[in-house]
Image (cartoon, rainbow, N blue to C red):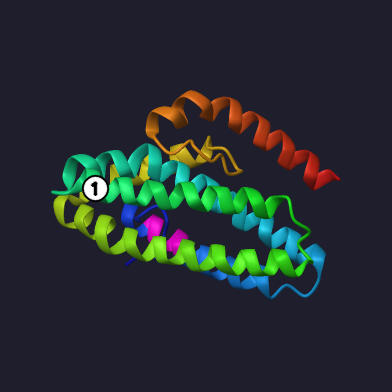
């Protein structure tokens, strides 16, 4: 597998992002002070939000059409993503230095990493087997485009491609404004 994102296909790109999420969970939990923890959590939340949006808009619809039990697999992943969005939204309201934040972050980490493992085994592996390399490279470009305009915060209840396309532009605008204000504050 190449280290260049430009050469990576959609599956490689998403698996790299899963590895980055694993690292960010560790870095957030082990941050030396609350300022560092806030910065790491900001990066974690942002990556998780844009990553899941791209999967919901690009990857899951393709998996529904490509996999034998695509609808069943995708429905299970969407339920997990909805749960994670609720957990992430709850974490946003907590003091990053609190014991409650630490406990809820640890639970989110367990849930997200189990979800990522299932995606890689049940969805990504089947896409790799069922699609031509050029199709996977095209999907990567679509994933990157979706991520570039995706909301940067969790929006529970918005787990379908249609819902993302209807609410996404407004949510993106609001999220990115909130991010800018938070960075300056």
Task: Name the residue: 59% across, 25% down.
Answer: 170
Residue beneath the point at 65% across and 51% down: 90
Tell me where residue 103 appears, x and y as whole percent.
65, 69
Inspect the magenta stretch and tell me whether residue 47 lies in it. Answer: no
Q: Against 83, is 180 above or below?
A: above
> Left or right of 81: which side holds 76?
left
Using the rendered view, name the quadrant where residue 118 is placed: bottom left
Residue 33 left/right relative to 53: right
* Residue 161 visible in image: yes
Residue 10 in the image, given as x and y percentages of width and height: 33, 51
Instruction: Pick the quarter of the image with the C terminus.
Output: top right
Which residues fall within the magenta stretch? 13-18
Q: Which is nearer the eye, 42 or 11?
A: 42
Question: Nearest the camera: 162 or 148?
Answer: 162
Secondary structure found at label 1: helix
Name the residue at 78% across, 66% down. 98
Q: Which residue is mark 1?
A: 72
Number of numbered discs visible in the structure rendering: 1
Along the horizontal axis of the image, is 118 left or right of 173?
Answer: left
Considering every residue shown, the one lying at the far right of the view is 185
Q: Position of residue 172 (x, y in %)?
A: 59, 33
Instruction: State the quadrant of the N terminus.
Output: bottom left
Other residues around mark 1 within 10 Å, as few (<14) / some (14–19) / many (≥20) = few
Most frequent secondary structure within the magenta stretch: helix
Residue 108 falls in which quadrant of the image?
A: bottom right
Does the image show residue 9?
no
Identified at 26% across, 55% down, the residue is 123
Q: Is residue 92 left or right of residue 8?
A: right
């Amino acid at each position: 597998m190449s280290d260049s994102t430009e050469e990576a296909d959609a599956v490689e790109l998403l698996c790299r992002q899963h590895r980055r999420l694993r690292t960010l969970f560790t870095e957030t939990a082990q941050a030396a002070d609350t300022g560092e923890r806030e910065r790491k959590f900001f990066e974690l939340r942002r990556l998780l939000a844009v990553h899941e949006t791209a999967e919901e808009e690009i990857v899951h619809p393709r998996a529904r059409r490509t996999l034998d039990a695509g609808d069943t697999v995708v429905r299970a992943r969407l339920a997990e993503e909805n749960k994670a969005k609720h957990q992430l939204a709850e974490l946003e309201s907590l003091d990053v230095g609190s014991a409650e934040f630490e406990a809820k972050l640890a639970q989110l980490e367990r849930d997200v990493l189990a979800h990522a493992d299932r995606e890689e085994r049940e969805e990504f592996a089947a896409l790799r087997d069922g699609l031509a390399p050029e199709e996977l490279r095209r999907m990567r470009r679509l994933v990157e485009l979706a991520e570039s305009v995706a909301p940067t915060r969790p929006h529970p209840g918005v787990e379908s491609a249609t819902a993302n396309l209807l609410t996404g532009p407004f949510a993106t605008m609001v999220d990115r404004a909130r991010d800018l204000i938070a960075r300056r504050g």
